[in-house]
Amino acid sequence: LAKTTQPISMDSYEGQEVNITCSHNNIATNDYITWYQQFPSQGPRFIIQGYKTKVTNEVASLFIPADRKSSTLSLPRVSLSDTAVYYCLVGDGYNQGGKLIFGQGTELSVKP
Amino acid sequence: GAGVSQSPSNKVTEKGKDVELRCDPISGHTALYWYRQSLGQGLEFLIYFQGNSAPDKSGLPSDRFSAERTGGSVSTLTIQRTQQEDSAVYLCASSSRTGVDTEAFFGQGTRLTVV
């Protein structure tokens, strides 16, 4: 299971772009990179997933460099409602026994 | 159902009592996960099921914790002889199959308070 490292916390202001980087130096060939968002008092929810290059959806963008040893979640023009914990997960369904392990995540605080 | 359903949403129990927490996954989802989240902490992985089978129970904190899943659907997490340190939010998630590459859907959780 690829180990991930991400900042414990980040602060931002409304309207700014926020980039959260996750390091995963021992990512395996079959591994995908998945990000979840957790609001206070709720379960996490899937935001975005990618394998390489760039992925964009209505919520965020995910940038993955060619060596795939890191990934960056980009939130455009954040609002107060984006205050949450963001988790980076790396793995696949075949080589890690099916576990879905969440690290400590990055606590994003958006201020007015 | 439309989403993952957990019951009860809140449970207050006395120290030493047994509790059962229930999770109804999304219909057709074969993978089911249980987590524990203490106040201000991250998600602690407890156990997962692939169908009715739990391949790895090493995440369960002690032998007071057990879980089962029947009919490939509903799962129950049982905590025997509850202790105050068991107080936490217990979250359940399901997905169409196991793995990071498959989206998991979480329930709202059961907040357990042991007094």
Image (cartoon, rainbow, N blue to C red):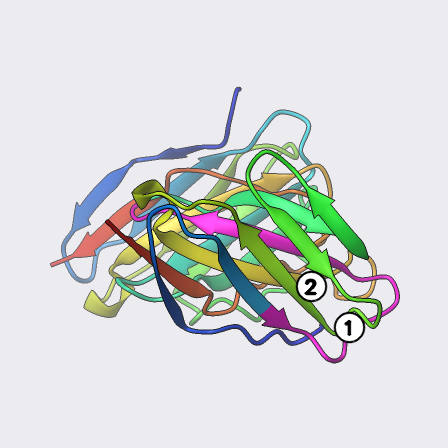
The image quadrant of residue A88 is bottom right
Kind of residue indicated by mark 1? Ile
Point 59% across, 56% down: residue: A73
Residue bounds of the magenta highlight: A22-41
Q: Does the magenta stretch include residue A28?
A: yes
Point 42% across, 45% down: residue: A43
Question: Label 1 belongs to which residue?
Answer: A27
Q: At which x and y percent is residue A58?
A: 59, 33
Circle nearer the N terminus (1, 2): 1
Kind of residue indicated by mark 2? Val
Q: At which x and y percent is residue A110?
A: 31, 53
Query: Can residue A13 be seen by looking at this rendering?
Result: yes
Marks 1 and 2 in Cβ contact (< 8 Å): yes
Toward the viewer: B12 or B111?
A: B111
Q: How crowded is mark 1: few (under 14 residues within 10 Å), some or many (20 or more)?
A: many
| SS at badge 1 | loop
